[in-house]
Each structure stands twice: as C-alpha cells, then as structure tokens.
Image (cartoon, helix red, strand yellow):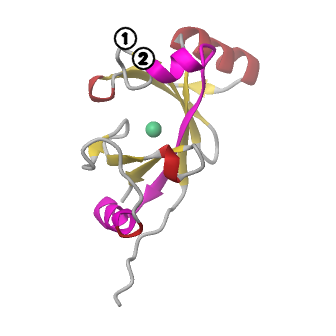
Amino acid sequence: MKEIISSVGKLNHIAIAVPNIQIASDMWKKALGANVSTPQTLHDHGVKVVFVEAPNTKVELLEPLYENSPISKFLQKNPNGGMHHICYEVENIKSASKRLEAVGAKILGDGLPKIGAHGNPVIFLDPKDFSGTLIELEEVK
Ligand code: CO
C-alpha cells in the first residue's frame, strides 16, 4: 500500500476568541510586553484579527465581525473569551485532506480549503475527533 505522506509540521498559531480586540490587544501589549500587529478584517472568516508575535509561534486574537460570525457561539459560551483553535502547518493540504478522509476524520464546512489569515489555504477539523479541540491545518510552502 502506498504511504500517505502528510504529517503535521510546526505549530503556526494559537487563536483566542475575544469580545473586544482593542482591550485584549492593549492588555497583551502592556502586561506582557508583546508585539501586537494592527487589526486586519477577514470577511471570509467573519473576524477581525491581530497577531501577537512570539519567537517560536504567534497568538491570534479574534473578534467577531458580526452577530453570526463563526466565533459568535463560542463567545456566547465563553463571554470573557478563550482558546478557540490551534493551527498546525502542513506541506500539502490536499494530501492532508486525503489522510483525514482515510481515517474518517471530518473536515468542517464543505471540506474544501479556504484562504486563511496568512493568504494560505486552510481547513478546520471537527473538534469531536480531537479531544474537543478545534484544529486548523494551514498549507505553508
Ligand atoms: Co487560525
């Protein structure tokens, strides 16, 4: 049998949903001395995002853009905010998708990659398959 060559690479980011990105950014800057980017609006994902840079990875703070944003329900359950997902890098998102399909792990939405915050294709995996954790896979060349 041909081996499927797709395994996770580096941890690219940890995403945290926040009710107010300005308040959160200020706190991470002032209390942690973190380097925080200017906010970006991602209409496809329904969020506003800032990147908090660390030497080995980054944290993304996400604020919903509108009431039915994909992170709105999460914030209703976690009104102070909380860890929303972790993102691993993969070399090839198509072969990663095939591997997931082969073991019966579900890809959320229509199962097809979307363009993520860094301009790369991303997919999200069903948290039910991963101990309650939402995992994003991002193709990084
Ligand atoms: Co992400």
Frontmost of labels 1 and 2 is: 1
Q: Nearer the viewer, residue 95 or 70?
A: 70
Residue under the image location 24 percent in, 49 percent down: 112
How far is mark 1 from mark 2, CA to CA? 7 Å
Disc 1, SS: loop
Q: Is residue 123 visible?
A: yes
Residue under the image location 71 percent in, 15 percent down: 30
Magenta span: 72-101
Please give left or right for residue 44 compared with residue 60 in the image: left
- The residue that disc 2 covers is 64
Residue 110 is covered by the magenta coloring: no
Marks 1,2: beta carbons within 8 A: yes
Residue 135, given in percent of the width and then of the height, sits at 49, 47
Q: Report the quarter where the N terminus lies.
A: bottom left
Residue 109, given in percent of the width and then of the height, sits at 29, 41
Disc 2, SS: strand
Ligand 1, image quadrant it occupies: top left
Residue under the image location 53 percent in, 18 percent down: 75
Q: Amino acid at mark 1?
A: Glu
- The residue that disc 1 covers is 67
